[in-house]
Amino acid sequence: MTDKVTLNHFLSKNPFSRPLTQGFFYREKMRAIHRIAPEVNFREILEVGGGQSGLTALLYPQSKITNLDLNSEYSQALCNQQERVRFVCGDATALPFNNNSFDAVTMFDVLEHIPQHEKAVSEVRRVLRPGGFLLVSTPNENWRFPYYGFMKPICPSDTDVMAEWGHVRRGYTLEELKDLINLPCLGHATFINSLTVVGHDFAFSKLSPLQREFFCTALSPLTWLGYYLHKPEAMGTETASAWQKVGQSVQN
């Protein structure tokens, strides 16, 4: 029996507000992460930059989770109050853990925020046990905001969005991730494609909350069509990927 939760149960726990309209992009992200997440019973998982989403705990509901984040306020988030979750305020480039401490590490939408990303990945490799897994999601070379030029009058620029979200780089090609992470890649899956991106960009536009909700709802048929037609290897604006540290595999 694997510890990984079923896809439908995972998606039903989407923590983003209005998960079927303005938060639909998060559903896409969760599906991609679920696709690349291994069917393994992990004892201990480190979530780097997990904040207040609790995504790793939702994905592996029987594992012990350590959620490390720079923002100490996230210690009060509901997801970090679970008995099996430990919150640690710390820096991804100087992980306060011993070598070979975790069966898996997750970095969901984190690497693009870290100036010294090489050092952060080196730290992750250090704390991973031999055979351990690293799960990552990042924007890729197709990301831009807004995606279509006709949306520019109602959207902030991608430079402004990157600054607001704390991004220090736009994203990574798969080859760039391979060079950075320097571990065998077990698989990847893209998400947010040329159809679903319209709803995503409305969700982060300069329109009022009511207007954003209206357009995201009106676009739902297009969004769902793009969602169902999307293949993991097709072009998307973001990528989820799985990597494994060389050595004896963690126990299944």
Image (cartoon, rainbow, N blue to C red):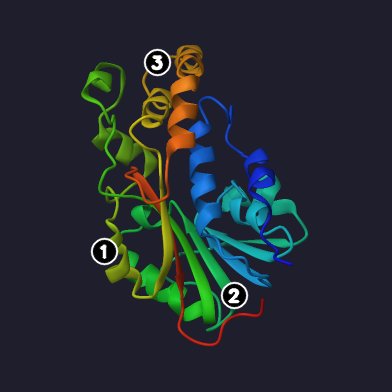
In the picture, measured across the screen, residue 121 lies left or right of residue 79, that is left
- Taking the spot 78% from the left edge, 59% from the top edge, the residue there is 83
Nearer the observer, disc 2 or disc 3? 2
Which amino acid, by three-letter code, is at mark 3? Answer: Leu
Farthest residue toward the left? 149
N-term mark: 1 or 3: 1
Judging by the rendered image, the residue that carries numbered circle 1 is 175
Image quadrant assignment for residue 8 = top right
Location of residue 23 in the rendering, given as x and y in whole percent from the top left corner: 53, 31
Q: Earlier in the sequence, mark 1 or mark 2?
A: 2
Give the residue displayed 45% in from the left and 83% down from the top.
246
Question: Which residue is tagged 3?
Answer: 207
Q: Quadrant of residue 143?
A: top left
Q: Secondary structure at mark 3?
A: loop
Q: Count how many numbered circles sit on residues in the image.
A: 3
The numbered mark at residue 30 is none
What residue do we see at 45% from left, 18% from top? 219
In this view of the protein, which residue sits in the foreground, 159 or 142?
A: 142
Please tell me which residue lies in front, 8 or 243: 8
Q: Is residue 64 left or right of residue 223?
A: right
Give the amino acid at mark 2. Asp
Contact between marks 1 and 3 (CB within 8 A): the answer is no
Say which of 212 and 227 sits in front.
Answer: 227
SS at mark 2 in the image? strand
User: How far apart are labels 1 and 2 at the CA level?
Assistant: 25 Å
